[in-house]
Amino acid sequence: MPKIQAPTVALHRELRRQQLIDAAMELALANGAESITVAAVAAKAGLARSSIYEYFASSADLVADLVLEELEYYTERLTQAISGATDPFTRIELWITESLLYVADGRHMLVKSLNTINTPTSRKDEILMGHRRMMAPLQDSLIEAGISNVRAAAALLASVTDAASIRIDAGNDAELEILSAVTFALAGLRALPTN
């Protein structure tokens, strides 16, 4: 029996699983999601290929875990960015700013890459729930601001941030794009009907 590298078997299994996730993340960041194969991840982690199947049903299952882990990381960034702000418009401003800083630092390319791989149908609801958790603070702020149609306002904000993301990706000055997006979005929100 192989020697475990943690105080308990459960901790050992979690460490091994995280080792595989980290190896897959490194591959995806360096070469895109299509580089995540069972053989490549096993080699990167220094494990036998068969070891991966103890933790993941397939490379697509592993990618689903990567998507969930990245959603959790992104949600934590957004939560930290708005913590302490009491005014809903300030929280919205901080949320948009942090979203676009995530784009500017290039990490969003990982998500774009991961989204090119079909995740198992059984995992799609889990990913959808992760996305909803990420969006909840923004929606809560829109509700608190008294916006009548929160769904429409969130869609408009998504359009503004998507446009700014494209411009940042194209090489435009990130700081200027973030300022423009925030200014435009907040002016638009304040012009919307309220309750």
Image (spheres, helix red, strand yellow):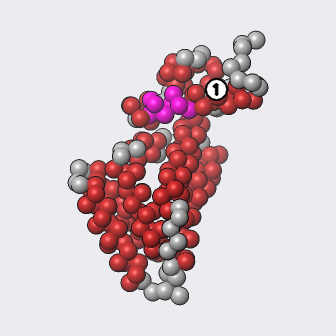
> Which residue is drawn at the image coordinates 46% and 42% (left, top)?
114
Q: What is the residue that sits farthest to the left in this orientation? A: 172
User: Vertical placement of 60 versus 194: above or below?
Assistant: above
Q: Is residue 67 above or below residue 191?
A: above
Tell me which residue sits at (75%, 24%) in the image. Answer: 7
Q: Residue furthest front?
A: 84
Q: Can you give x and y, in whole percent of width and height, for residue 71 in the image?
A: 53, 49
Of residues 183 and 118, which is closer to you in this image?
183
> Is residue 71 visible in the rendered structure shown here?
no
Name above or below for residue 100 compared with residue 190: above
Task: Provide the residue designation for mark 1.
Answer: 16
Residue extent of the magenta highlight = 21-28
Position in image of residue 126 (x %, y %): 63, 50
Q: Residue at x 33, y 50 (%)?
A: 104
Would you say residue 63 is visible in this rendering? Answer: yes
Residue 4 sits in which quadrant? top right
User: Which one is nearer the viewer's eye here, 113 or 172?
Assistant: 172
Q: Quadrant of residue 192?
A: bottom left
State the residue in front, 147 or 151: 147
Membership of 173 in magenta stretch = no
Secondary structure character of the magenta stretch overall? helix
Number of labels in the image equals 1
Q: Residue at x 55, y 77 (%)?
A: 144
> Could you tell whether 145 is left or right of 97 in the image?
right
Indicate the amino acid at tag 1. Answer: Arg
Residue 83 image position (x, y, % from top left): 53, 61
Q: Is residue 131 left or right of residue 187?
A: right
